[in-house]
Image: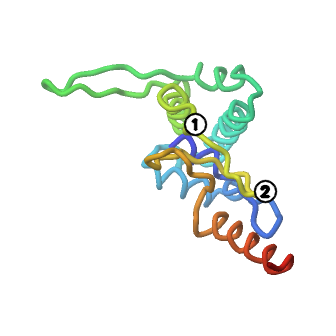
């Protein structure tokens, strides 16, 4: 989920696109991840964008202060339901719920498999992904998009230069 928030900005036809530009995009993202906040989408958007920017800064190697500031807004509280353990997210303001959960998920990914969290190798792509391939050699956010463009580009380069 953390990388899903990071990837709510992308490039399309050379132009940046932000899913949160309109409130329907915010509502859709929250609904897709079964998170609260759709009743106050403007407040949720502000928190989500703050978290997304902080997460992108961490992934770009700019330090974790901004992400820690987001994480300071919440915590997880362990609970039991009968004999079954679970966790409750506790935030200081309801609008932080989705942003906090996504930020905490990114920290979990970075703790578990930091070498597998990667930026897409596409020269115009700004997306990040978790490489779950067996040998850890995935380079593209998707083979259908950036991977295919790279293959076509290499093919065209070979055709231009000849045998």
CA gap between label 2 and label 1 equals 28 Å
**Left or right of 75 in this view: 7:** right
Q: Name the residue under label 1.
A: 99
Q: Mark 2 points at which residue?
A: 123
**Left or right of 73 in this view: 54:** right
Q: Quadrant of residue 11?
A: bottom right
Q: What element carries label 1?
A: helix
* Residue 36's disc number: none
Please provide percent x and percent y for residue 163: 80, 78
Q: What element carries label 2?
A: loop
Q: In which quarter of the image is residue 89?
A: top left
Note whether 39 is above or below 95 in the view shown.
below
Judged by depth in the image, the label closer to the viewer, 2 or 1, is 2
Please provide percent x and percent y for residue 62: 77, 27
Note whether 20 is above or below 98 in the view shown.
below
Q: Residues within 10 Å of mark 2 (few under 14, many from 20)?
A: few
């Amino acid at each position: 989920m953390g990388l899903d928030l990071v990837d709510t900005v992308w490039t399309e036809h050379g132009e940046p696109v932000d899913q949160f530009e309109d409130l329907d995009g915010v509502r859709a993202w929250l609904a897709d991840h079964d998170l609260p906040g759709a009743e106050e989408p403007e407040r949720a958007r502000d928190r989500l964008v703050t978290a997304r920017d902080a997460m992108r800064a961490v992934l770009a190697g700019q330090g974790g202060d901004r992400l820690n500031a987001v994480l300071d807004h919440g915590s997880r509280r362990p609970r039991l339901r009968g004999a079954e353990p679970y966790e409750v997210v506790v935030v200081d303001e309801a609008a932080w719920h989705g942003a906090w959960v996504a930020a905490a998920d990114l920290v979990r990914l970075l703790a578990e498999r930091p070498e597998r969290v990667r930026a897409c190798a596409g020269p115009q792509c700004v997306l990040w992904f978790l490489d779950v391939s067996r040998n850890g050699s995935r380079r593209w956010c998707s083979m259908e998009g950036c991977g295919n463009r790279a293959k076509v580009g290499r093919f065209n380069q070979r055709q231009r230069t000849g045998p």
